[in-house]
Image (cartoon, grey):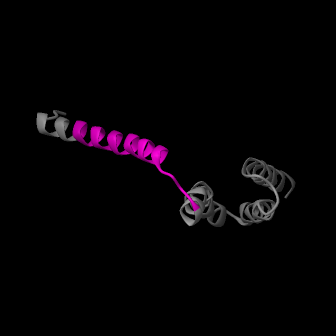
């Protein structure tokens, strides 16, 4: 297989563009002064991403995982995020082992 220089340049250009957009986001977000609703929106991003990653597999793999996700959702009303992850993992392990 032979790669021509145009393909290599395109791959390198896309890699540089991807890296620059990611690093620019860190610099811009670090200099923002967030208040009120904007701060609340930015604070909601990590849990929203976590749910977007977990929900499809929790709902598509079986009733044990769906039940464990529901248990974790209930725990999320009272516990911090790291503890909720622990409760969810423990629930999946227990349900898979016991049932």
Left or right, residue 31 beside residue 47 = left
Q: Of helix, strand and loop, which mostly describes the magenta segment?
A: helix
Numbered-mark total? 0
Give whichever of 51, 80 is nearer the camera: 80
Give whichever of 60, 89 is nearer the camera: 89
Q: Quadrant of the N terminus?
A: top left
Left or right, residue 26 beside residue 56 = left
In the image, what residue occupies the spot 39% across and 40% down? 23
- Residue 20 part of the magenta segment: yes
Residue 18 image point, x, y percent: 33, 43
Left or right, residue 33 beside residue 67 = left
Residue 31 image point, x, y percent: 46, 45
Give whichever of 27, 91 is nearer the camera: 27
In the image, what residue occupies the spot 19% across and 35% down? 8
Q: Which residues are magenta?
A: 11-35
In the image, what residue occupies the spot 48% across and 44% down? 30
Q: Quadrant of residue 51?
A: bottom right
């Amino acid at each position: 297989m032979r790669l021509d220089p145009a393909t290599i340049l395109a791959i390198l250009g896309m890699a540089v563009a991807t890296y620059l957009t990611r690093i620019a986001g860190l610099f811009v977000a670090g200099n923002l002064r967030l208040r009120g609703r904007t701060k609340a929106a930015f604070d909601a991003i990590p849990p929203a991403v976590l749910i977007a990653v977990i929900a499809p597999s929790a709902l598509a793999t079986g009733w044990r995982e769906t039940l464990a996700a529901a248990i974790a959702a209930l725990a999320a009303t009272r516990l911090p995020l790291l503890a909720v992850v622990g409760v969810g993992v423990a629930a999946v392990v227990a349900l898979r082992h016991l049932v």
